[in-house]
Amino acid sequence: MAIVSLSRWKVNLEQAAPLARQAGAIVKRHGAAAVRFGPCYAGPDAGMLYVAITYADWAAFGRATQAMSADPEWQRLYGEAMKIGQLVDRSLVVAEDV
C-alpha cells in the first residue's frame, strides 16, 4: 500500500509555488512516486496550501526521509520554506487504490 505524506501550510501561494516545484524534484530524486501541491478552496482550511507526497511503501518512505535529512539542497530549500510560511500540520496516510 502507498504511503501519502499530506502537509498543510499557511503560506502565500505565489511565494511558495517555486519552492514547491523545486522540492518536488528533490523528493522524486529520493524516491517519491508522485508530488502534488495546491491551495484549498473550500472549508476551514481555505487559502492554505496542501502538499501530497506519495511513496510506494514504507520502505520507500524511510529511504527517502533518511536521504533528504542528509541532503544539503533539501535542507536549504526547507529552511527557505519555513521563512516564508508555517507548516500547520502533517499526516501520514496508508492508502490503497480502489
Image: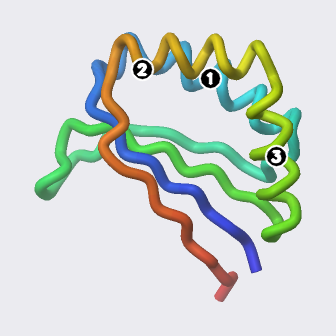
User: Which residue lies at the image location 68% right of the left edge and 31% below the top edge?
Assistant: 24
Question: Which of the two labelled residues, at mark 1 and mark 3, occupies the earlier sequence position?
Answer: 1
Secondary element under disc 3, as helix, strand or loop, is helix
Question: Which of the two labelled residues, at mark 3 and mark 2, occupies the earlier sequence position?
Answer: 3
Relative to 88, say whether 81 is above or below: above
- Mark 1, mark 3: which one is toward the viewer? 3
User: Which residue lies at the image location 86% right of the left edge and 59% below the top edge?
Assistant: 60
Binning the other alpha carbons within 10 Å of mark 1 as few (below 14), some (14 to 19) or many (20 upward) gives: few
- Which numbered tag is attached to residue 33? none
Judging by the rendered image, the residue that carries numbered circle 3 is: 64
User: Which residue lies at the image location 38% right of the left edge and 12% below the top edge?
Assistant: 83
Judging by the rendered image, the residue that carries numbered circle 1 is: 21
The amino acid sitting under disc 1 is Arg
Relative to 83, say whether 89 is above or below: below
Binning the other alpha carbons within 10 Å of mark 2 as few (below 14), some (14 to 19) or many (20 upward) gives: few
5 left or right of 75?
left
Nearer the observer, 73 or 38? 73
Binning the other alpha carbons within 10 Å of mark 3 as few (below 14), some (14 to 19) or many (20 upward) gives: some
Judging by the rendered image, the residue that carries numbered circle 2 is: 82
The amino acid sitting under disc 3 is Ala
